Amino acid sequence: MDPYLYKELKHCDAKKCWTLVKNVIGVQLIDENVIMVPFLPEGNFYDLGRVVVKEERSPMQKLARVSPGALSVGKMTDFVKDEVVSGAFHKLTELQKVETVHNPRYVFEESDMKHGVKKTVRVEILGCDHYALWSLPDNNSLVMDFDNRGFPYVKKFYLIYDVFYARQINVYVRINDEVDEFCVRERTPIGFRLKRYRIQPNGLIGPVKSIINKEWHVHWIKNSMFRNPMDTLPSVPTSSKSTNKNRHTIAQHQGPLIHGAVMHSSETTEH
């Protein structure tokens, strides 16, 4: 086991363990230029067509190179105020399947013992596939409005245009005799790529820039810890309890992640 992983694996928590191994898994299963979903239970917040924004930093924070917070805030279509180029809005719902080649039954497993403490991590990812937006919005094609949707500070945003999915994910962690498992039994995003768009003073989207994984340094914010200003408050709080204390499962879901999307085919790429 990697010394860093052994040191940071302090608690038998399968959900948190994902954050420690996701980048290695991304390189081995997909490639190095992919951003892995930061929190596995919140994978659907990083689906195609969604928008990520960064927190504003003070001059002192920038000088100290403090990583900004980043959060998925909704679909790009939620923030479009007007369509300048005909068809630009509809293009945000057109998808293509990218025929990339991945290990259909990927397994990451490491184990080590130090000072009488044995730690084991096993992650199994089944059925990885790849989808992308059919085309990206052009410059000056759409007018955006973040101000009236609760995000007045946003001057640029990041569009998720390329997503890798898994059909099932199993995470197993063991520290001595303590065991924890987390399973996702539905098709869910595990990794994605971003394009950055600037917002001009008149609201039009400006030049687009590809974001390289090595240049993406942020502190991810959990959606479960943030109330989106566009969300309506629930009238009755809901809660659920697991029947097995140390086993967490997301039930199987048969429908597509993106409803009403137009599907296309594309050429084969091999990783």
Image (spheres, helix red, strand yellow):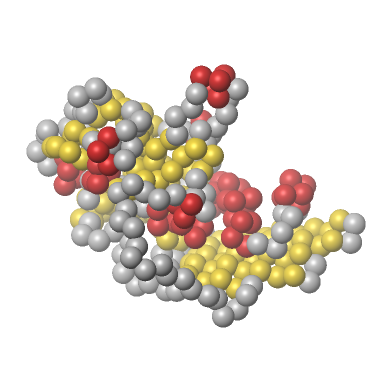
Q: Please tell me in which quadrant of the rendered image residue 153 appears.
A: top left
Identity of the residue furthest to the right in this view = 115
Considering only vertical position in the picture, is 62 above or below 41? above
Q: Residue furthest left?
A: 86
- The quadrant holding residue 143 is top left
Camera-side residue: 264 or 261? Answer: 261
- Residue 93 placement (x, y as % from top left): 22, 50
Q: Residue at x 56, y 61 (%)?
A: 106
Judge whether 157 appears above or below 263 on screen.
above
Instruction: Mark yes or no: residue 126 visible.
Output: yes
Q: Identify which residue is drawn at 89% across, 61% down.
A: 116
Residue depicted at x 34% and y 58%:
233
User: In this orientation, which residue lies closer to the viewer: 69 or 192?
Assistant: 69
> Left of 50 or right of it: where is 113?
right
Q: Residue at x 62, y 51 (%)?
A: 21
Q: Residue furthest bottom?
A: 243
Q: Is residue 269 visible?
A: no
Number of numbered discs: 0
* Image location (x, y in percent) of residue 146: 28, 37
Residue 178 at x, y percent in the picture: 75, 70
- Left/right of residue 234 with respect to residue 126 in the rendered view: left
Q: Is residue 11 left or right of residue 240?
A: right
Residue extending farthest to the front is 235
Front one among 252 and 12: 12
- On the image, the x and y values in percent for residue 67 come to 55, 32
